[in-house]
Amino acid sequence: MKLNIEGLLVYFPYDYIYPEQYSYMLELKRTLDAKGHGVLEMPSGTGKTISLLSLIVAYQRAFPLDVTKLIYCSRTVPEIEKVVEELRKLMEFYAKETGEVNNFLALSLSSRKNLCIHPEVSSLRFGKEVDGKCHSLTASYIRAQRHGNPNLPVCRFYEEFDAVGRQVPLPAGIYNLDDLKDFGRRKGWCPYYLARYAIIHANIVVYSYHYLLDPKIADLVSKELAKKSVVVFDEAHNIDNVCIDSMSVNITRRTLDRCQNNVDTLQNTIHKIKETDAAKLREEYRRLVEGLKEANVARETDIYLANPVLPDEVLQEAVPGSIRTAEHFVGFLRRFLEYLKARLRVQHVVQESAPQFLKDIFDKVCIDRKPLRFCAERLQSLLRTLEIADIADFSAVTLISNFATLVSTYSQGFTIIIEPFEDRTPTIANPVLHFSCMDPSIAIKPVFQRFQSVVITSGTLSPLDIYPRILDFRPVTMASFTMTLARTCLCPLIVGRGNDQVALSSKFETREDFAVIRNYGNLLLEMSAVVPDGIVAFFTSYVYMENIVASWYEQGILENIQKNKLIFIETQDAAETSMALEKYQEACENGRGAILLSVARGKVSEGIDFVHHFGRAVIMFGVPYVYTQSRILKARLEYLRDQFQIRENDFLTFDAMRHAAQCVGRAIRGKTDYGLMIFADKRYARSDKRGKLPRWIQEHINDGSLNLTVDEAVQLSKHFLRQMAQPFRQEDQLGLSLLTLEQLQSEEMLQKISQMAHQT
Amino acid sequence: MASLSEEVLLVVKKVRQRKQDGTLYLMAERIAWGPEGKDRFTVSHPYSDIRCQKISPDGKAKIQLQLVLHTGDSTTFHFANESTALKDRDAAKELLQQLLPKFKKKANKELEEKNRMLQEDPVLFQLYKDLVVSQVISAEEFWANRLGGVNNGEPAPYNNKQEVGISGAFLADIRPQTDGCNGLRYNLTADIIESIFRTYPAVKQKYSENVPHNLTEKEFWTRFFQSHYFHRDRINTGSQDIFSECAKQDEKGLKSLVTQGVKNPLVDLLSLEDKTLDEGYGISKALPSTSNANKSVKESSNSAIIKRFNHHSAMVLAAGSRKGDLPTDQASETSSTDGNSRDSDFFQPPLKKVKLQEAIEYEDLQRENTPKTVALNLKKSDRYAHGPVPLQSQQYTTSQDIINSVSYIQQEMANYKPNLTRVLSSTAATSAIAALSPGGVLMQSVGQQSINQMVPTDIQGELKHLYIAAGELLRHFWSCFPVNTPFLEEKVTKMKTNLERFQMTKLRPFQEKVQRQYLSTNLTGHLEDMFQTAYSKFHIWQTRRMMRKT
């Protein structure tokens, strides 16, 4: 249908539309009009992606000079591919309606592992290996060497792309990962580099967060993207953690040992080169005097060693004299390494800030701040000069130099914690230096500054106001949309007591309590008898799940559950879990029914949807708080309190509830879907917890279902499931939660929609 | 002696049967017993007739062996030789144990099938009694038609019987019971053993390797339950345990399952992340301790339990769908042969595409174009959802409704005008009236309806059986036409004689009985008619045949 969104003609590739999709597009349009940033929450399964794409594509067509590009960031590879498929659908609709083939270029970009078509390289299993192997075939100096020695191995796909691929722009169309590969195969071009090259002139780019948020990669991949782009972060409820992860470094004794080896190798190579080809080193020295900018030639393929930070002014400056010659730099690295080793030889926990660390290093080994800052860049240059092929081996020394650069660049927002041993095993020495980022806004700041509109969206962003605070930006629009429903297809229940009136809770004091564990088991058992097909249960942590499973096993609860359904359990091994997941789906598919025991914050809770019969009930055992005893977390909480005035408890609860909402939200993937959401912890009943759940879940929790016993919950579930099993037709939805174009145009409906949207 | 021609495998003397001393013979194909001093067998059962054997519990005074036959009868032998009774019995038992399964396979599958059919279908059973037991037709003839129909006509429900899956909790069903003196007793049924074998092929292999050469069945299962394999959480590794190998094999199986990877790309957690952080970056969430050394015993046993549950569920699922798997495997094979079989990329996309399409589809946003299905229309969905509610609101017709309808009818009647030009002719009307007056053709049904009252129920039942039996015979008869093979010729003649015999042995007595009770004889009139039709058909056919021959 064709919509009129405040004067903008939007093509929407479906015959009907949800009211909330309309409101979402309205808000989004206002954000784009204002050229500002926005935070939008809309439940999963209400067609967020297609609304977003429809509006932005329409906007791009209407105002091609205002918005030149859409950068769509998602989290996982399947999600990226889904977005591209939805886009394809939209474009097909455009072609059908307008009758003309528009020259839109949209493509997805992923890591080499997903795009490589080189027969040997692509057969490697791990992303790291693929990257390393690719690098050893395509790095600039390797290719330069080949001029002298044509027998060296070569990636013909890259060579072909390098020779002709750049001249011919990628023809307009929609390219998913597989399409890129196909295209690459046909032309004999490397799809990965083709995609990286093509994103510069593409209208829509779909890729993962890291390409924008991880400065090590962003600098290389996303540097040249136009300023007039709209950036969308989908599934952004965890965006702060992604930011923090990309800026944090951990150094163990093993890292240092490997680093030592690396430095030794560097030393030897330098010696060798000095004897054979001293001119090369002199040339490098000359370049370094002129400034790092010059050293940037042909960096495209050298992704592996990118700089962790991107202060442009650093690149303008010349590298300080003390580390300019290769030997001096290696000596410098040695000193730094020794210093770190000494620091790791502690007996007690040390926590300090970056300036303290810098002062200490200056006092002890006379290393200045400035050369530290250039450390990463200098190492890159050296590795290139030395023409080291297998770059993967040098990850340790790269890590150390990145750490040096980070610690000397940022005086705020980071903390250094040195722990001599793990808390659980105080007798075994395993010293770790955590250099941890506490301020997610550091990594995302360049994004907000550079692009005119950044939209953060997800199914669970409640409470909305906390994201602008922790990411330090000013949104022009903030809205949370609920799911209009013709029938209440979700049924949140808070089970606070067992049948014996024992309070259910996963809080620390009672988590070993047998009565609680038994009652939890009872809940699962009773549910397994009532709920058809699939049940997913989430625990607060892996250790907690292991303990509970063991004691359920001893008490024979699991055996009884097995009479009703098969049991699959998430393990820490991803491959094993994938297998379990597939079998779980198979068991749901063939009608036997199954239970998946899983962990909040685990991979399953973040990336797998349980649509329809794959998840008719989700049980959340306990409140998924983070492990609060961790020093890193404590430091971060402190920082949040001092810098952003967010109380520790508020943040912890917020964090726990967003994960709980993520977990239970996995089961509802649309209006035709239905599912039970069981919160098995009495603490959910408190308003500070409940209030932090997304609106679309909150509004279905009635006061009667706040502190149920297991029996009561089973009774309510039975009722709910029977009602939901009735046929649900499109006509039932029409006019309520599903609108035709005529209905949408009626004055009355528009009023109703705007009323709903303004409740936020 | 009959046994001379047979191979005698075991002879046990001093075996009592019905308080009579005698000798038990185990022969190649049957078991037999003869009383002392006589050279004939009073008891003789082919092995294929024996369903199972039972033995008296150890420690009982009488040492007995009971044979239960398929027919349900049983024969008990009492081993009376004081000194060697137990040994004798065990020898017989062991031999039987080996012999019986061999015959079980042969053991008339058909017989069981017939038995089952008769039990499931009371009408058929009655028919069987009427026709076969009373020797109107032979059992073979009876079944030839039946089973033939079963095998050819509708092979699906019987031959391709859907394989029964395995209960996920079959191990839970083996509840150990204490026997009072520090021991545990497990009760195993054939079903459970079957389940164990199907779920854990490794155990089956062990079983076939070790039983009965190295271990008796009992010992085998005792060890199974004792073994660490069953109590997987206990970490005690006895290397001499025969099941430790099974555990290893299971581990291997699990590993191979894991390395096979998953077909559905949307659940592949390995390729979920686009770009993982390199080692050393990121906030480490409780660094995974790589060395197993600092894992406590409890932790590793916990993870063993988890592994075991995953494996168990996967195996149960696989055992249930092993048959269903075949077609899909073939499908994937064919698709792999047309593509480049080495490069998995070539045939991966279709599945992936499908899954992606499924994932982005919003069925309610599109116009429905699926074929209309019939919806289950529940008049009272409340009753369905909640079960009966004690207080029910009943539907009354209000007085207003009644008045309305009365006045409506009145109005109709007032406006009624007979359409005289289109009424019946007078003769037709008269005959209709005659037919409808008492004694008329159409009013006879009133009299027939009262058959319920007129005829006693036992006669009614008998009549019903007669009808069914006659119908069956006639079906046989008519199915012979057109008679175009010699076999059919033979059959049709035979069927005719069968019909006649039926008429003589069944129908006549019934008619006489009815007459004796002074009931109207035309109860059997229709039956007679049917027979007559059949006979005349037969005669026509016979005369034609004669003419052709001459």
Image (cartoon, coloured by chain):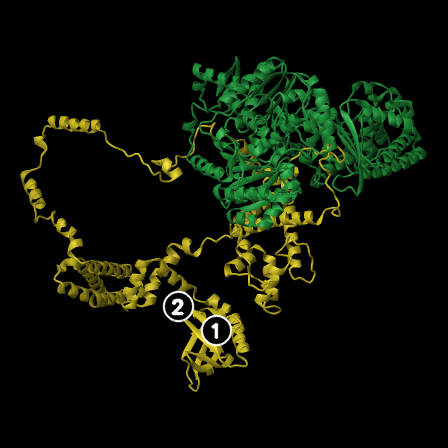
Relative side of A655 to A313, left or right: left
Kindly identify which numbered label has been placed on residue A165: none
Position in image of residue B311 (x %, y %): 60, 50
Decide if residue A3 is on the left or right side of residue A261: left
- Residue B346 drawn above or below residue B165: above
Residue at 76%, 42% (x, y): give it. Answer: A425
Is residue B550 visible in the rendered image? The answer is no
Q: Which residue is mark 2?
A: B71
> Which of the 4 image quarters holds residue B246?
bottom right
Residue A667, can we see it?
yes
In this rendering, position of residue B394 left or right of residue A168: left
Q: What element does badge 2 sit on?
A: loop
Give the colour chain A carries in the figure: green
Tell me residue A566's x, y (percent): 54, 47
Q: Is residue A187 above or below residue B326?
A: above
Q: Quadrant of the C terminus of chain A?
A: top right
Figure chain in yellow: B
- In the image shown, does A633 or B401 lie closer to the viewer? A633
| Residue B532 falls in image quadrant | bottom left
Whole-percent x, y for residue A638 in the image: 73, 25
Amino acid type shown at disc 1: Leu
Q: Marks 2 and 1: which is nearer the front?
A: 1
Measure how far apart labels 2 and 1 are at the Cα level.
18 Å
Label 2 is found on which chain of the structure? Answer: B
- Where does label 1 land, which residue? B65
